[in-house]
Amino acid sequence: MNQQAIKYLDPVVVSKLKNIEVKARLIVEGFITGLHKSPYHGFSVEFAEHRPYNTGEPLRNIDWKVYAKSDKLFTKKYEEETNMRCHIVLDVSDSMRYPIQATDRLSKLEYGCYLTASLAYLMVQQKDAAGLTLFDETLNYYVPPKAKLSWLMPIFVKLEEVVRQKEYFTHRTATANVLHQLAKKISRRGFIVLITDLFSNLHEIDELFPALQHLRHCNHEVIIFHLLDKKTEEKFDFPNQPLVLKDLETGEELRVQPEQIKERYAEVMTAYKTQLRKRCRELQVDFIEVDIEKPFDKVLLDYIIKRQQLTK
């Protein structure tokens, strides 16, 4: 991957660009450039424009240029054949606004917005349809999927608004309720991409799985991008000095000595994530862990691989 491509996959660099539309375009272009220069070059833009040739189909639809390069028969896939409708569902609750103090780092929400924009742009570039849902306690914004770049503009504008918001202690999370609402709202089979930190009261985690099962029962494919600042939220890596933790959704404060609770915290977090992985696997929901310190290319590649599996 060249230096220009790497530059636009760096979350810190991305955050300094002019607007969401530009950020999304440069992230995707950098990613595609990287694919063509990596062992994953097969996951190029061709996957959305071609499909394997089946015996008996008209020869006029074969793409002979692709055959000359790959020695494999593919037919041109026309836009009306594309049936992927992607609903990107972004958690905008206040827990996603962590971390809030470091100016040189993205919050989970900012990272999620840039990832959302990139996925939507990538989908439409591949002639699939993309839409957006924002939620906290309620489903508060919904744009159905369409396969037009112009359709993305209001989505980008809305994401810009979300990034600019600086309110705290006002937006709690009710993921399960929102997913049930979505399952009832979306009538046509689609691909649900849930971008969230999955932070809520521990007793509410069991409510998440029936909601995911509801989506699967409606024949939706589901993938979860689980966003965390792994250094602090998973490893509890803080300086060994008195610390005040504040719940960004309720304002509740807790004074702790990190070294005294670090081991127990890690145990609880490990058990929590093990349960998430296990239950998602049982429901055939893809669960992908994302460290917000990392570049976007790994996240996008995981998405592309999943999408490849769905279109075979």
Image (tube, rainbow, N blue to C red):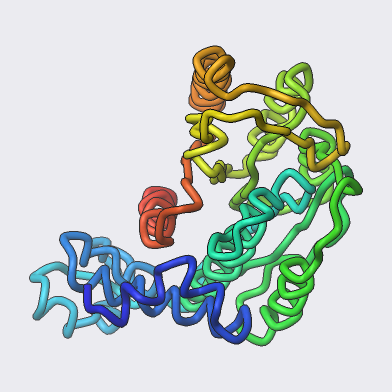
In the rendered view, would you say 30 is above or below 137? below
| Residue 207 rendering spot, x and y as whole percentages | 76, 23
Q: Is residue 74 visible?
A: yes
Residue 159: name its quadrant.
Answer: bottom right
**Closest to the observer, 173 or 131:** 173
Q: Is residue 297 left or right of residue 17?
A: left
Q: Is residue 80 visible?
A: no
Q: Is residue 165 left or right of residue 115?
A: right
Residue 104: name its quadrant.
Answer: bottom right
In the rendered view, would you say 87 is above or below 77? above
In the rendered view, would you say 134 is above or below 93? below
Screen quadrant of the N terminus: bottom left
| Residue 69 rendering spot, x and y as whole percentages | 10, 78
Query: What residue is at 61 percent from the left and 76 percent from the top?
Result: 147
Query: What residue is at 27 percent from the left and 84 percent from the top?
Result: 60
Q: Is residue 139 left or right of residue 242?
A: right
